[in-house]
Amino acid sequence: MSQNTFLRRASEKPSRSRARRGGADVLLAASLWGTTGTVRTYADGASPYSVAAIRIIIGGLVLLALAASTRRGAGLRRLLADRRNLALVGLGAAAVTVYQTAFFVAVERTGVAVGTVVTIGSAPVFTGVIGLLAGRSAPTGRWTLATAGAVAGCALLVGGGRDAGAEPLGIGLALLSGLSYGGYATVASVLITRGEEDRAVAAALFGAAAVPLVPVLIAGPAGWLLTGSGALIALYLGVVTTGGGYLLFARGLRTTPATTATTLTLAEPAVAAALGTVLLGERLGGAALGGLVLLAASLVVLVAPARRRGRGAAARGRGEGAQGGNELV
């Protein structure tokens, strides 16, 4: 083995290891998000609007506190001091707000099953289209195959064996939610790959997104927050599933493309279904079980290490990677 070949392979190993860790961070974040539905069932008297608002407000405060305590907030100050970043921070924060609001309104109008599958299933597709239009990267055949399988599995899992209504406006809002989530993931990926600190990016986006949701929380019924169980649920949803979940997601974006990351988040309904079966006594029909298997297999295909390419293909891949790093602004 030549010295150049040895050095090249040695440099590839840490890169692959970091990529696997990034995928694991995203899957762990999706697993945390998958617990929210089960936890929300114990919040008596809580409206979906107040739950969404308190999640983002508490999560935003937690992320801001973490960013401010990391090197005395140097990363957050650097992020906001760069004028190129301000438009992206505003765009990403708006995407977070629209994603949350549109999703819960969609669920209210068209049902949990349809609203969830349309939002979560459309997000990876929208992210791929946004990345293509922005010149960041072209979706690979592997990503397309895995995403198609995961979306189909998600549809079978969420809607299998249950009758669900499909209201046009609700479907439109769910698509808007999926588009907004794809926009958030792309903006976060651009900022992080630009060299900004992942904690600072998550803090800036969610801290800004929390501002317009404060009136939503005040206007809605919030008495459930004054009970002991309600306060604990709010803290779990805000600190763990939002603060912790999106911090893991941001860290994963350092080594995982936004297109791949949003596909990996399709693990969320699988975790929700498993918890519903174990804790809430829900049963999965044959179609739903088949969807769970298809979803899991698709995610395995996506995160499994790719076969080593030849020197020519590797050189082309490096060229494509450099082209895919173009920024939005």
Image (spheres, rainbow, N blue to C red):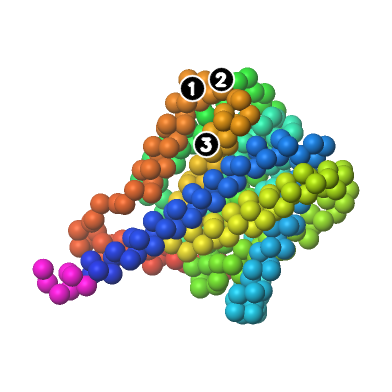
Going 60% across and 79% down the picture, which residue do you hit? 71
Q: Relative to the observer, which residue lies in front, 314 or 241?
A: 241
- Judge whether residue 31 can be spotted in this image: yes
Going 11% across and 68% down the picture, which residue do you hit? 1
Q: Report whether 294 appears left or right of 90.
A: left
Any mark on residue 78, and which? Answer: none
Give amino acid for label 1.
Answer: Ala
| Figure quadrant of residue 298 | top left
**Comparing marks 3 and 2, which lies closer to the viewer?**
3
Kindly state the secondary structure of the residue where label 3 is placed. helix
Q: Earlier in the sequence, mark 2 or mark 1?
A: 2
Q: Which residues make up the magenta segment?
A: 1-7
Expressed as whole percent of the image width and height from the top left, the position of residue 238 reads: 70, 53
Going 61% across and 42% down the picture, which residue do you hit? 35
The residue identified by callout 1 is 287
The residue identified by callout 2 is 161
Give amino acid for label 2.
Answer: Gly
- Quadrant for the C terminus, please: bottom right
Q: Earlier in the sequence, mark 3 or mark 2?
A: 2
Kindly state the secondary structure of the residue where label 2 is placed. loop
Mark 1 Cα-neighbour bin, 10 Å: few <14, some 14–19, many ≥20:
some
The residue identified by callout 3 is 270
Q: Report whether 65 appears left or right of 267.
A: right
Q: Relative to the observer, which residue lies in front, 259 or 256?
A: 256
Give amino acid for label 3.
Answer: Ala
Give above or below for 140 relative to 283: below
| Figure quadrant of residue 122 | top right
